[in-house]
Image (spheres, helix red, strand yellow):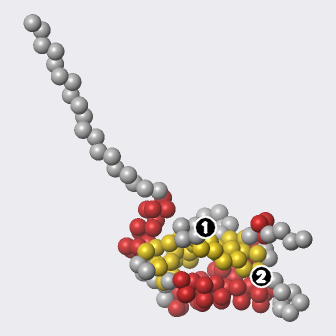
């Protein structure tokens, strides 16, 4: 009688790496400290320059994970100069919107410079917010 050899079964382990967002979130939670007041002041210049280059009337601050958004209207040309409005929006964004939500860990332009990526720590968990032009989504009649 001929013996049939048993098939060897390979044991496999499923390792999930997560998405790029999950990896970045983990890095921010474990390895990035909150920005100092001085660093936040320096980031205002980054945002002011970016606002000048994008030159839109509406902007949104959005965190999809938290379903959290704020819409900014940048212009009130009857009462203010456009430069003053950009400065006001920048100050409100950093000094109020971000500060009231949590600790700001990072503020950087996205690779293609179409948005500002902001990482916040809220109750010990990190979240990514994007600040981006929103004119295309506004319909005025």
Q: CA distance from mark 2 to mark 1?
A: 21 Å
Neighbor class of circle 1 (other Cα within 10 Å; few <14, some 14-19, many 20+) is few
> Which residue corresponds to mark 2?
74
Task: Name the quadrant containing residue 67.
Answer: bottom right
Residue drawn where x is 48% and y is 58% of the image: 20
> Which residue corresponds to mark 1?
110
Q: Is residue 108 left or right of residue 22?
A: right
Task: Name the quadrant containing residue 77.
Answer: bottom right
Q: Is residue 6 left or right of residue 102?
A: left
In the image, residue 56 sits, relative to residue 13, either above or below, namely below
In the image, residue 113 sits, relative to residue 91, either above or below, namely above
Q: Secondary structure at mark 1?
A: loop
List x then y, in percent, for residue 114.
Answer: 68, 66
Closer to the chain start, of discs 2 and 1, is: 2
Residue drawn where x is 46% and y is 83% of the image: 34
List x then y, in percent, for residue 76.
Answer: 83, 86
Q: Secondary structure at mark 2?
A: loop
Mark number displayed over residue 119: none
Residue drawn where x is 55% and y is 87% of the image: 100
Q: Is residue 32 left or right of residue 137?
A: left
Task: Name the quadrant containing residue 141.
Answer: bottom right
Residue drawn where x is 79% and y is 76% of the image: 57
Neighbor class of circle 2 (other Cα within 10 Å; few <14, some 14-19, many 20+) is many
């Amino acid at each position: 009688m001929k013996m049939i050899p048993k098939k060897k079964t390979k044991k496999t382990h499923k390792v999930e790496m997560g998405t790029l967002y999950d990896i970045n979130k983990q890095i921010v939670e474990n390895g990035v400290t909150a920005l100092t007041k001085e660093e936040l002041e320096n980031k205002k210049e980054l945002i002011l320059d970016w606002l000048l280059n994008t030159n839109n009337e509406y902007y949104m601050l959005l965190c999809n994970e938290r379903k959290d958004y704020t819409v900014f209207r940048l212009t009130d040309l009857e009462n203010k100069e456009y430069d003053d409005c950009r400065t006001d929006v920048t100050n409100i964004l950093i000094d109020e919107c971000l500060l009231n939500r949590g600790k700001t860990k990072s503020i950087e332009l996205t690779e293609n410079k179409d948005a500002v990526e902001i990482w916040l720590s809220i109750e010990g968990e990190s979240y990514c917010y994007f600040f981006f032009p929103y004119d295309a989504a506004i319909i005025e009649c």
